[in-house]
Image: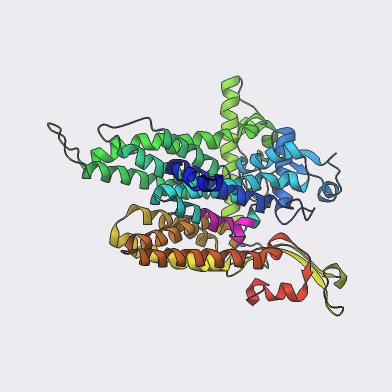
Amino acid sequence: MTLLARVPDRLGRIPDRAWGWIGPVAVALLAFVLRVWNVGRPRILMFDETYYAKDSWSLLQHGYVQDFVENANDKIQAGDTTALMTGDPSWIVHPDGGKWIIALGESVFGLDPFGWRIAAVVIGALTVLALARLVRRMTGSTTIGCFAGLLLTFDGLHFVMSRLALVDVFLAFWLVCGVACLVADRDWIRARLDRYRFVRPWQLLAGLSFGMACATKWNGVYVLAAFGVVVVVWEVLARRAGPARAGVRRSSWVTTALAVGLPAFVSIVVVAGLVYLATWTGFLIHHDLYEARFGRGYGDYSAPWGAYVDKPTPGFLGETRDALRSLWHFHVMTFDFSAHGLNDAKPHPYQSNPLGWLVMERPVGVEYTGDLPADRCGAAADSSCLREVLLLGNPILWWAGALALIAAIPAWIKTRDWRWGIPVVAVLVSWLPWFLSAGRPIFSYYAVVMIPFTIIAIALVVHALARAAVTPRHRYVVWVFAGTFLTAVVMSFWFFHPIYTGKIIPYGTWHDRMWFDRWI
């Protein structure tokens, strides 16, 4: 027997459990290679990188975020990292969790574009892995899990966000991990319904993940709250539906809910709170600096924090109490600004209403350089070249995903299959709260946290079609359909790739990709 003839036989001996890791890891590696390629260009601070890249560097250097000097961007882009900060603590809008991850890349590669973007590349690829594993667990199919991972690999919005020093891609990762841990906990407890288990490893990991999500952006708390309820409902229904044991009286609904819910609250919510608090260690250690700048009142957004600002409480416990009080006041000040301070903000050219986010009605341009000489890109002499990095989701994927989400709602109602509820709940609690802020500038790239769960809806539709196929021919048609859809997604990705990566292209080539006026 030849060596080539032995290869299929040896591959066939690999257990499905091993394929369940080999496939998703391979897809994640593909995602990493696509995202890391040329990620250091353009060599400028794009869009909100001007905040997150610099804040992360300040955390790395001083343990807390300081204000930067006026010409800091020019100095950084010129390679000068000296004398960048003023020494005054900065008023940060988002917690430090995501910025600490960016700082990890900067600690290795320095304050340059590769350094402040590499963390997003790694986390973006890990999100692909986590999603593929989650879908595999939900469907029992490695193929469908890899299918979901490939869809996320070739989504334009997730791709670009995985190449920028913005924190939303970290939020998406931690939310996918949190939900994946709760799904794993669902399987874990169903094999152990003989008694109540108060130490749940998967719930503890979910608490860690949701804590990091909230420490990245506060809106992670909506997903934490929703799935905290969902995981309790799952277990209560499982315990109530299970067979009654001899001599054991079945507990009431309320008793069962309390027995399940209270430990879950500790494992998920309390752990998440402790993780969140831990990410504010820099603030707590340097609380006196924040009190000196903000504690006596700060503009229209903060009243004086209290007499302790001028007369600190003596002793270690007193200082700890003061630090926690200051952290609370800082949160109140930031919340008031987020809730009311931006209501009178000037309109932004890329702001959009959340109603259009799921179909990418208004993408966001993070960098644009136009009117470049025609010889820069081989354009006609009477034309010009340009470069743009556009936060635009893969249209084929997002439009199909919107339909899959709509289909998931009646499927969930009709079948009462818990799996359909995951994308529906996750997307709704990630999306609907933004309608409360629709009166101020908000942007469609916030929806990057929704696309992994939208892809879950697409994967579940394919899975349902495959299960409904009663003959090999029917199954063949389903897989041809899935393969054709994936091919269309890949082709669409490569079509838009030049405006995902900021490649210098002729004006006409760019305009061919602006399918709607709202995309310009």
Instruction: Give above or below for 265 relative to 357.
Output: above
Above or below, 317 relative to 164? above
Q: Inspect this view and state whether residue 127 appears.
A: no
Residue under the point 55% across and 35% down: 277
Residue at position x 87%, y 70% from top? 375
- The image's colouring method is rainbow
Magenta-highlighted residues: 148-159
Nearest to the observer: residue 267 or residue 86: 267
Residue found farthest to the top: 315
Q: Nearer the viewer, residue 60 or 289?
A: 60
Q: Going by the image, does 171 lie left or right of 78?
A: left
Measured from the top left, where is residue 491 in percent x and y? 60, 67
Q: Quadrant of residue 445?
A: bottom right
- Residue 237 vs residue 422: left or right? left
Residue 452 placed where, x, y %?
Answer: 51, 55
Quadrant of the frame with the C terminus: bottom right
Give the percent coordinates (x, y) of residue 151. 54, 58
Check residue 498 for magenta coloring: no
Residue 303 sits above or below residue 44 on the image: above
Q: Is residue 357 left or right of residue 234?
A: right
| Residue occupying the point 26% across, 31% down | 195
**Residue 258 image position (x, y, % from top left):** 29, 38
Q: What is the magenta segment's predominant secondary structure?
A: helix
Q: Residue furthest left?
A: 247
- Residue found at the very far bottom of the displayed protein: 382
Examine the structure image and report whether residue 152 is included in the region drawn in magenta: yes
410 vs 212: above or below: below
